[in-house]
Amino acid sequence: MAITAESIRAKLQDALEAQHVEVEDTSGGCGQAFEAVIVSTQFQGLPLLKRHRLVNTALEDELKAIHAFSQKTYTPEQWTKIQEKAA
């Protein structure tokens, strides 16, 4: 089964009960590099390293098969502030 941006998005949304997940295939379509933005209440009170470990655990099998994965993790409050600044 091929790894796609959609399959990663769905897995992160389920595993982390994420309110918002964006995943982009940055490999030009070959499915070897992805960037993700994840917003979850599970990140509340956690330092960045622990947030990334939660994501990496959720994607354990996928990370063995792809070349690169970049992630940005936010709490809902942080995400709201980012969206307000962008508006």
Image (cartoon, helix red, strand yellow):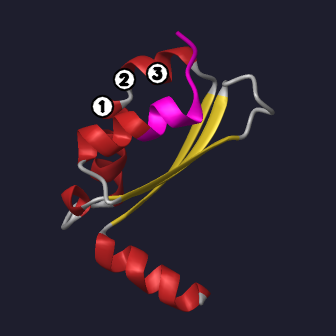
Place of residue 2 in the rendered image (x, y in percent of width and height, measured from the top left)? 58, 14
Q: CA distance from mark 2 to mark 1?
A: 5 Å
Asked whether residue 65 appears in the rendered view, the answer is yes
CB under 8 Å between discs 3 and 2: yes
The amino acid at mark 3 is Glu
The amino acid at mark 1 is Thr
Question: Who's the residue at 58% across and 28% down the image?
Answer: 4
In the rendered view, tell whether residue 69 sits above or below residue 37: above
The magenta span reads: 1-9
Q: CA distance from mark 1 to mark 3?
A: 10 Å
In the rendered view, tell whether residue 13 sits above or below residue 48: above
Disc with the residue nearer the chain's start (1 vs 3): 1
Q: Residues within 10 Å of mark 1 (few under 14, many from 20)?
A: few
CB under 8 Å between discs 1 and 3: no
Place of residue 69 in the rendered image (x, y in percent of width and height, measured from the top left)? 56, 37
User: Residue at label 2?
Assistant: 60
Q: Is residue 4 left or right of residue 42?
A: right
- Membership of 65 in magenta stretch: no
Circle count: 3
User: Residue at label 3?
Assistant: 62
User: Residue at label 1?
Assistant: 57
Question: Who's the residue at 31% across and 79% down the image?
Answer: 77
Q: Is residue 57 left or right of residue 84?
A: left
Is label 1 in a helix, a strand or a loop? helix
The amino acid at mark 2 is Glu
Question: Dividing the picture into quarters, in which one does residue 55 lie?
Answer: top left
Q: Residues within 10 Å of mark 2 (few under 14, many from 20)?
A: few
CB under 8 Å between discs 2 and 1: yes
